[in-house]
Amino acid sequence: LLTDGSRTALPRQQTLRATLDWSYGLLSEKERMVLRRASVFLGGFSLEAAVGVAADEAIHASEFGELIAQLVARSLLIVDTTEAAPRYRMLETTRAYARAKLDEARETATLQRRHAEYFCQLVVAAADAWLRCADADWRARYLPEIDNVRGALEWSLGLAGDAALAVGLAGGSGPMWTALSLYGEGAQRLEAASAHIASNASLADQARLWLWLGVLSEAWAPTRALAAFERAADLYRTLDDAQGLGQSLTLLAHARATLGSFQASADALQEALPALDRSGLPKLRAFYFANAGFLKTQTNDLANARTLYETALSLYREAGSEFATAASLNNLANVSWALGDLEAAENAFREAVVMHRNSGHRGKDPLGFVLANLAGVLIERGKLSDALDTAREGLPLLSGAGNAWSLIDHVALRAALAGQLANAARVAGFTDTAHAAKECTRQPNEARARERLQKLLTCHFDAMTLDQYLAEGGRMSEAEACRMALE
């Protein structure tokens, strides 16, 4: 860290401070203003963002291009031209120096607020664009700003912050956390914002916050997600926002199907369809068909599930949604698997794996889910060694975020087939406890694996011994169960 240049500072710090003082002294007053104001950015910034945050009556927007170019020429800013549009950043030592100058100028509070306001507008636009843009274009435009969004959220929830801004920032940022597979961090940040909903927060911002909090938490806390989706739907009804209501009802339908409330899920989908059809957005329409397919899968109506998933796949491809296209392939593979067509299921899962590896999606969870499913098919096909290798890659991608619990039944079965019956029983105890705690029903392929495992265990152990192993497993963490299953 830089010091104030006192004689007690280390010689290297004194030299660095003197160098920065000299460079700063050579700048024009407007260049100094741009440099110190740019210190509020985290992880870099675009010219557009610099203008949006730092321009005022003292520096006109039209001047920023030349002023920033001068700072680059003096090595006080670094320009990255590998992205579609140039991005600028400072070395951390330069940023610390510029931030101190911002404090001296008594501009910090004003610039932090303007930074949060700018990125609130940006993430709200991002949430809308997520429904309309191809994945690659959307990622390139919005994901580079994730550190700025973090900083804006932290300020807005701080003592000098603004709770209404926090709600807008949190809800709008939802798609960014999912695109980066930062489900845990995203849920934590949105949960914090939800605890500080201000009376002046707009209903639209509140609805968006609850919708994305549900999305981010459903995999590990489905009952909490259900409540969040219900709140989002209620707010969108109040707003008479048909598109928002349709989206939240479709998510609500998925949560209800996960929890075994099949008729309530069907009711939500029936209410959602007209609004999503009217939207004319391929991604939203695909979203409906994908979730309708999930309900049919849960109720074992596999022929109709396949038809719905195929429709979703076609629409996602039309929308340029690489991630959802791969997810649809995963869904179709699951249906083939449930229908007993193991070769088709294996081929489809492998295609989805390739798509995830080649996509620009940075997240771990989607690839982890596909690999874990592929491992399950390989186990059912008797390819135990290949299955173990696949599971050893896939499950760790999920367990870090607490998302592996729903797929561990397959590796528990593999352990039993490999002769590790005591460990298989313990892992089964973990999965039974996890499903009960989350009030979730198993999906058909996982239910079949658990039934097959139960037959093996009851043939090998007496009831008292088996109950003991199951109870031991019920006390394990997900990470412990994964490690045991992958031995």
Image (cartoon, rainbow, N blue to C red):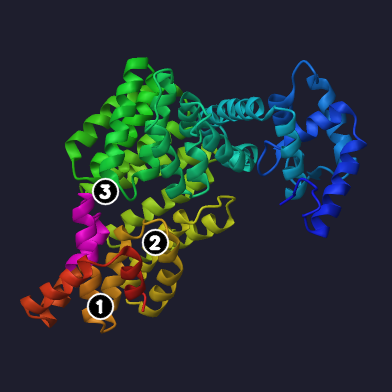
- Residue at image x 37%, y 32%? 210
Q: In this image, 76 relative to 424: left or right? A: right
Badge count: 3
For mark 3, give the secondary structure: helix
Gap between marks 1 and 3 measured at Cα? 30 Å
Check if residue 432 falls in the magenta segment. Answer: yes
In front: 356, or 404? 404
Q: Which residue is mark 3?
A: 297
Mark 1: give few (<14), some (14-19) or many (20+) Cα within 10 Å: many
- Residue at image x 52%, y 29%? 161
> CB under 8 Å between callouts 2 and 1?
no
Q: Position of residue 382 (x, y in %)?
A: 32, 77
Check if residue 437 falls in the magenta segment. Answer: yes
Identify the amino acid type marked 1. Asn
Gap between marks 2 and 1 measured at Cα? 18 Å
For mark 1, give the secondary structure: helix
Mark 3: give few (<14), some (14-19) or many (20+) Cα within 10 Å: many
> CB under 8 Å between callouts 1 and 3?
no
* Residue segment shown in magenta: 430-451
Instruction: Please report whichever mark, 1 or 3, sits nearer to the chain's N-terminal start.
Output: 3
Residue 423 got which mark?
1
Residue 399 got which mark?
2
Q: Position of residue 219 (x, y in %)?
A: 34, 49
- Residue lying farthest left? 463
Gap between marks 2 and 3 measured at Cα? 24 Å
Name the main secondary structure of what is drawn in magenta. Answer: helix
- Please say if 233 is above or below 397: above
